[in-house]
Amino acid sequence: MMDKESEWEIVRWLWSLQRKGRWRMSIGGEDGCIGTLALSWSFAGFRKTEKLRMVHRTLAHCLQDPMETVFPKTKIPKCSKEEKKLLQKAAARSRRQERKRSLEDFLHYESINISDYYFENGLRKVFPYHFMFKAYVKRRWIDRPIHEVLLDEFNFPFPDIIVKKHARCDSGDLRVNDECISPDYLLRDSDMISHKVHRHEMPVLDSPIDFIHEDDDLLVINKPASIPVHPCGQYTLNSLTHILARQYDRRPLRFTHRLDRMTSGLMIIAKNYDASLRLATEISAREVKKYYICRVDGHFPDEVEDSPSTLPQGVIACTQPLGPLCSKMGLHAVVSESSGGKPACTHFKRLLYDPDTNTSLVVCRLFTGRTHQIRIHLQYLGYPITDDPLYNSSDWGDKRGKGAQYGVPVDEVIRRISAHRSKDSYLDFVHGTESSISGFDRLRDHLNSTRSALDKEVRDRLLQSFDSTCPECIRFYKDPDMKCLVLQLHAYRYEDRQRIRIRSFQNIISSVNDSRYMGTKSRV
């Protein structure tokens, strides 16, 4: 026999259906008890589901035993506004979870066959292709001209094609809600921006992906450096998501955490919704311990002045809050919480010190997952990661950002870093750049002279992908330096609440680029 509260829950549910126009219901009886309950169809052809049949059986049972008076006879039971909102949110959450659980593919896989790979000088490259960027207007973009948003929020190597020549707008490559607009169009809430571009992806290392473990729920891999996890910026096919799908036939995968593009190491990937929900819950509850190993400049200390005394010997904690410094470049720094910084905590411990190179091997444990957290905290302590092109640079001042003291205004730091990260520094000029020579002929001469080692099929495919309206097609770049592809930071260990440990030591030597650190004798 059902309890009285459950019986009244059914009555409330039926009443809600009546309010939606699906039922006609009347409740009557003596002394406020359920005496009769008449149900009739409101829509012809409305089929009874198994749930409705169960309700009929339950109501038939309810009529046999009168219930105590819960509501006055003349009052219809209703939920409060707060209860109704909670029920609606719970129902919406349940529907979203069910859709995710049954999802067999994702939107970012739509472009998986948009182009192909080719390989050159140990790098994985992608043939140029036309791509449609789509994005809904963010709150901070509302009532701003679209050309201003494109310049401020996105990295366009040639913004003049949008602002000066109106080429993208006039050709229809730049649209809002699938309609042509002018560069001065003011964005509104719920607008969808579509931008068609001829895309030249950045190259990544042609490194194999090691599979550490795989079962029906989880996939554990060793991610190579230089490869971003998700499609972003100038990476789509050269992302881990698409490489695993195309080369290793692993799709769809659900990533519950990520590593920076230049960071190598272990990644735990869910293969279904239930596994991703369980793993994401553990990570958000900080029940998963994450350990990294890196090489830093200088003799990393055993203690610092403001380090808590409760820490184990040799462990140094950094708890400086972190926040974005320049969202357009993905640049972050130590930012006070009053200025929008978020709490962050990292523990460090020195393993070895090499006096010949004046570098230390350091183990790091993350307690939060802020962007570039380890790199920024090490910079703040004054021991940045060796050869870190972003956070180990004189652009941050004479002390390279130690103690978040730059010696110059923050805007000047951003300007310096932006200038040094320009793609123009990788330009590879070739002969025959006179205006009388067409862009197609320049590309053909460049392929035949500088890149003659490529197969003829690859060169022909590159010529076929030429777009006369794309400025990138007539600009030829050298391959990026290794220090811009590989960061000496490796995720080597995860441990969950069940004490399940996953470790990867075989790639630590290559990750820190110095086999002397793995010797048996410590030099402290």
Image (cartoon, rainbow, N blue to C red):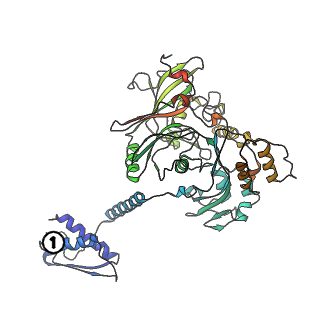
Q: Quadrant of residue 383?
A: top right
Q: Amino acid at mark 1?
A: His
Please say whether residue 227 is visible from this viewpoint.
yes
The reply, left or right, for residue 381 in relation to residue 154 is: left
Most extreme residue toward the left is 65
Most extreme residue toward the front is 456
> Where does residue 250 sit, x and y in percent of width and height?
49, 50
Residue at the spot x=73%, y=48% of the render?
Answer: 456
> Where does residue 30 sit, x and y in percent of width and height?
13, 78
Circle 1 sits on which residue?
61
Quadrant in the picture for the N terminus = bottom left
Residue at the spot x=47%, y=18% of the render?
Answer: 520
Vertical placement of residue 66 versus 484, above or below: below
Q: Quadrant of residue 90?
A: bottom left
Vertical placement of residue 234 versus 496, above or below: below
- Label count reads 1
Crowding near pointer 1: few (<14 within 10 Å), some, many (20+)? some
Residue at the spot x=47%, y=21% of the render?
Answer: 302
> Where does residue 233 sit, x and y in percent of width and height?
61, 49
Vertical placement of residue 168 versus 274, above or below: below
> Where does residue 164 sit, x and y in percent of width and height?
76, 57
Task: Name the secondary structure under disc 1.
Answer: helix
Query: Which residue is nearer to you in this view: 238 or 398?
Result: 238
Query: Which residue is nearer to you in this view: 213 or 6?
Result: 213
Please say whether residue 524 is visible from this viewpoint.
no
Vertical placement of residue 245 versus 5, above or below: above
Query: Which residue is nearer to you in this view: 223 or 336?
Result: 223
The reply, left or right, for residue 5 in relation to residue 291 is: left
